[in-house]
Each structure stands twice: as structure tokens, then as C-alpha cells.
Image (cartoon, rainbow, N blue to C red):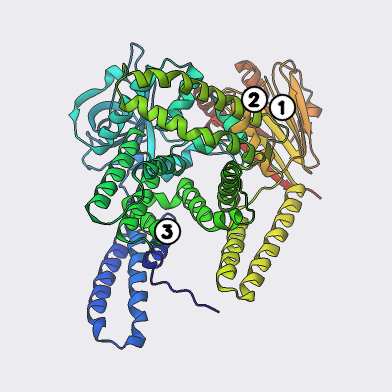
Amino acid sequence: MKPYNYSPIPFVRLLIPLLAGRILSAYLVISIPLYVLVFVGCLLGLVFIYYSRRTKYSQRWLVGVTISLMLFALGLVSRPHYIFESHLFNNTHVYSAVVKQVVKDTDDKQSIILSCSPADTVCKFYFKALLYVRNDSGSIGLLPGDKLAFEAQLTEFRLTGNPFAFEYAEYMGGKDVKGQFYVNANLIQHLGNNFSLSRFFYLTREKADEKLRHLKLGEAQFGVLSALVLGDKSLLDYKTKTYFSNSGAIHILSVSGLHVGIVYLMLMLSFGSIGKGKVGLVKVVAVLLILWFYAAMAGMSPSVFRATLMFSIFVISKRISQRYNIYHSMAITAFIILIINPYTALHAGFWLSFLAVASIVYFYPKIYGCLYFSSPWAKYLWALFSVSLAAQIGTAPLAINLFGYFPTWFLISNFLIIPILPFILISALGVVVLPFDFIVVRLIAEPLSAMINYLIEIVQWVGSLPNATFVGLQLSFFQVVLFYAVLLFFVVWQYLKLGRYLVYALLFLFVGLVSISASSYHKYRRQFLVVHQIKGQTAVSLTSHNTGNFWFNEPLGDKEISYAITPLVLNQELSSFQQHIIESAMVWPIVSPYYHVLLINGEADIGDLLFKKVDIIVLTSRLKSYQIKTLLSKIEEQKLVFDSSFSVSQSRYYQKQLQQHKLSAHFVSLHGAFVLINNCE
């Protein structure tokens, strides 16, 4: 047995309590007394640490416990909690604001995150909101740091309520964005601007974007190049994103550790090893400047900042000592990120990036060492296989939980795409840095276009292969934790060579497999009736015993199905499902063992006897107003649902009509999807 020595990685021990405090703070309401208690506790802790020099060596562990408790407490209270008054919703006020981030920018629209304050209320406070700006006459051009004033109505983000679907309202809530404004550009008053790093990064990316547009690529080509080099995915269409996702190559469209790592490796090949003395110092400074220039060019998104900071710490660590510990460098990076942005602890990208790096660092040498090749090309391909597989080992459980599928042919796409990725990145950086009339840039343009075409064709081919995505395994958060416990105990067993840790790993694996089997059985017995929330559409689903039926008024687009319907199909592990288009049907009965549903899609003469046998009535907007009033006069105990084909204004109108009749109903456009769950026998 060789006990693990934590002294080379002190930041790992510092990171754990801070991370725990950050995560717990998301689920607690922090009160003023708690802030005071933490402040007093930290002061007492500092006093104890100061006088601990006089304590016996055997009691020094108390210092470590005290530091851990202090970091946990700081993590708990240092997450910003903005003051906000809910009466601002659905009322018009005058706001003063500062642009924090440009989310999306097109010719006539911008989506912007603001820090804003109501200017016409007594109490002054700031909160974050999303501003949608439209300018029919041309470009808007708002930038980070711009100071604005406008009069508008703040509206809440609405939950769709679609089972297991991505909720944009929750996503924005995780960023502490309270609501949204819709304002025309001519109603916004510009009050100047403040200098900010965000403004500098945004302008740097805009200049890089302008240089890349000189290449005169096609729309699809430029969209891929912009995403790959600058991290701007707004120009990609849904089909292109789907192909990249299904082929397991979606990670190359998000500028992150892979891209920064390629730039870093190119720099190391150019500069050679970082040594001591002044020459080594110059190399470190040059590498750091180029890495951060690329990060600025890519807009300094969280993933870019995270990767650049990590590689910067690697470079500095190598300068300080050739025997640096890469896990310690990762812990320092995570610690700094959590100090700068407390919300990061709740972002999936934070966990995926660190899990991928940690998994590559540990598993890559072991996988690569399994086989030996004498050919340089065979070594390169085997190394590529080993890196891809190592990264997937660490990220697969969380990725399956987040996305609901696993890209089956990811190794093929990585084999065919990643070898040309450095050439695309270096070529694009050359276009950005060098003058466009420089002969090298003109020579780069055609090969760069050919490489992007090759990349697009590969992902389309791999993404359209049979069984491109494996959806047979769905993991809950609890099951994800179990599988990471398996990995952790396996790694500990590999290091300490103690059999009990292998037993722990196998035990957690057994519990995980039992949990998956029990979950699948539970899903098999569960029946869902859902009236989905898809703006302007009729969509009803009934699932049970791993089969499903879906009713639509008209065929839905791939994007609508992917966001609203597919999550239910995946989560319930449906082996078969049928789609029914009811466009011409006036009345459509939906029968289950637990309730009878009547979908009324137009004018129909429904007999009283049939009406009384119905438990749930779903109405579509194809019904005329007088027809709805006639139906209301027949309602007794039936549950009434107005589907999402009714607009918000229509739903509010009929809500008032029902109140006059002393009736209630579920309005999908107002209340989210209508969901009933039963356990089948």
C-alpha cells in the first residue's frame, strides 16, 4: 500500500470545499444574518490560523479543517444575489441599462443581455435582463459597454412544460437573467459607453469576422468556419448542427480546449521547449500573448476563457518546474474560475471540459500503451484513437444525461476530421493576422475552402450512417453520480493497488446497472398524456409500454420535433411511435385505460351521450368563437384544454370568458404543456 501524498496538489484540497459551497448556494436563499455569521466565522478562523503556529504538530490538521470550512462558507455566500421586485413584470417602466453581452447579432436584430435599473421607481436596484432589439431599416450595432435608456414592458420567461425538454427559462434563470424586453431600435436612447474588456473582445472578434468574410465563402462554409474559429454558431442552420451532433463532432464547433490546445501545440513546435533563463521567459510571454490574443479573437466566451486559462497555467507551471503536476494546474484553473464567476459551478460546459481533460490525462497513456506501432502514421492514428476514447470515458455519462444520446460513430468522425483541424485553424488565423492583399493569404483561400467542404461532407456522411446515435441508454442524475463513483474508485484502485477499492467500484457498477433496469421497468409501466407547447401548433402525445402515438394538425419541422417531442421519446425509451396528421378531421378520439380524450379540431356535432363519456377535451384554434361558446354550455366535469395553436392573446380572451361561466381550463400558451402521468398495470 502506498498512501497518496496530497502535498504536491494543495489546490485540489482548496477547490473541493469552495466548489461544494458554490453548488449549495444555488439551492439556498442567503439571508443577511448568514452573511454576518460567515463574516464573523471567517474572522475567528483567521485568528485561529494566526495563533495555530503555537499548537502541537499533531493538532495542525485543525488548520486544514478551518481553511476548508472558511472556503465552503465563502463559496456559499459569495454568489451574487440581485435585488429584484416582481411587480415590474407586465408593467411599462423607464429603464437605464448597460449592455453586458451581445448574444446574437444579425442584419436587423440583436439579442443583448443588459444590467438594468428602473429609472422611474423610488427604490434603485440593478438586475440582468434580455433585450430583443429590432430595426427594420438596417443594422443596430449596440456593443458591450453601451449605456441605454428606453421605455418598455418586462415580461417573464415562460416554461414550455414539455416533459424532459430543454427549458430556456431555466437556462436564463441559471444566469440570473430575470426577464426579457422587446423594443424597436428607434425607441432606444444611446447615452454613451463605458470601456470594458467585453467591448474590446467583441470588437476584436468582429474585426476577425470581417477579415474572414473577404474569403467570399458560401453561406454554409462561412457558418462552419465562423463557429470553428470564432465560436459564433449563429450562422449555422439546424440541419448542419444536427449532422455535427450526430457524428460526434459538435465539440469542434465550440471554441474550447481542443482549439486552444492545437494553437498551444503549434506554438510549442515553433518555440521548442520552455527552458530557464531570459530566453525561457521570452518564450513564456510570447506563448501567453498569442494564446490570449486568440481567446480575444474568439470573443472570450466562457469555454475559451476556461481553456486559455488552463493552458496559461500549464505554461507558467512548466516555467517554474519541469515536474509540475497537471492535476494541480487544473485545480488552480477551476479555483480561479469559481472565484471570478460563481455561476460556473452549475454550467455543464465547466464539468464537461474538466472531465475531458482529466480523463485524457489519466486514461490516454494507458490506452496508448496497450499497442505498439513502428510506423509513424500508425502511431499518429493510434494516438488519435486513444485521445478520443479517453475523452469519451470521462464525459460519456454526463453527456448522455444532458443530451439523451451517444454518437455511435464518433471515432470515425474524429479520425477523419481532427487531422485537418490544425490546418484549418492556422490558415484562418493567417487570414486574420496578415493583410488580405498579402500573397500568402490569397494562396490560403482556396485550400481553406476545400478543407471546410471536406469537413462538411464528412459530418454529413457520418451523421447519416445507420444508428448514428445510440439512444438505448438514458441516465438520471443519480445514475451519473454512480458511474462517476465507479470511475473514481477504479482510478484509486489502479494507484493504490488495494483490492477493496476495486470491490467498491464493482459494487457501485452493480448498483448502477440495477438502477438502470429498475428505471426502465418504471418507464415501461408509465403512461404519459401530453398536450405539447409548440407555438402556433397542435401536438398531442400518448405513450405507454415503450410505444407512443402523436397527433399533429400539420407536419412539424425537424427543429420543433427535436425540442418538444424527442426528449419524451428518448426519456421514455420508446421503441416505436406513430405520427398521425389530423388536419382534415373535425373530431379525433384518444382512448386510454384511464381516461377518454376528445380532440376537437373544427365544427362538429357532438352528441350529449358521447360528450358525457369524455374526461378531457382538447380544443384547437380551428374552432370558431361561437363554436367554443356552444361547447362551454355543455361542459360539466370534463377537463378543458386549449392547445398551443391558440395565441397568448386568444388564450387570455377565452380565460376571461370562462371566468364569466365560472369554469376553468388549462391554456397551454399561458400555463405550459398539459401533462397527465399514470402507472400502467
Query: Which image quarter: residue 61?
Result: bottom left
Q: Residue furthest front?
A: 374
Query: What residue sits right under mark 3 in the picture?
Result: 326
| Crowd class of label 3 (few under 14; some 14 to 19; many from 20; radius 10 Å) | some
Q: Which is nearer the eye, 88 or 511?
A: 511
Q: Nearer the viewer, mark 1 or mark 3?
A: 3
Name the residue: 60% across, 24% down.
Answer: 457
In space, the residues marked 1 and 2 are separated at their CA atoms by 8 Å
Query: Which image quarter: residue 244?
Result: top right
The amino acid marked with disc number 3 is Ile
Q: For the N terminus, which image quadrant?
A: bottom right
Q: Would you place residue 337 above or below residue 629 in this image? A: below
The amino acid marked with disc number 2 is Thr
Residue 337 seen in render: no
Query: What residue sits right under mark 2 in the picture?
Result: 538
Q: Which is nearer the eye, 559 or 158?
A: 559
Q: Position of residue 107 (x, y in %)?
A: 37, 17
Which label's residue is closer to the chain start, 1 or 3? 3
Left of 491 or right of it: where is 150? Answer: left
Left of 633 or right of it: where is 9? Answer: left
At mark 1, the secondary structure is strand
At mark 3, the secondary structure is helix
Residue 466 seen in render: yes
Query: What residue sits right under mark 1 in the picture?
Result: 551
Name the residue: 48% across, 16% down.
Answer: 218
In space, the residues marked 1 and 3 are separated at their CA atoms by 54 Å
Q: Residue furthest top?
A: 137
Q: Is label 1 in contact with label 2 (beta carbons under 8 Å)?
A: yes
The amino acid marked with disc number 1 is Trp
Which label's residue is closer to the chain start, 3 or 2? 3
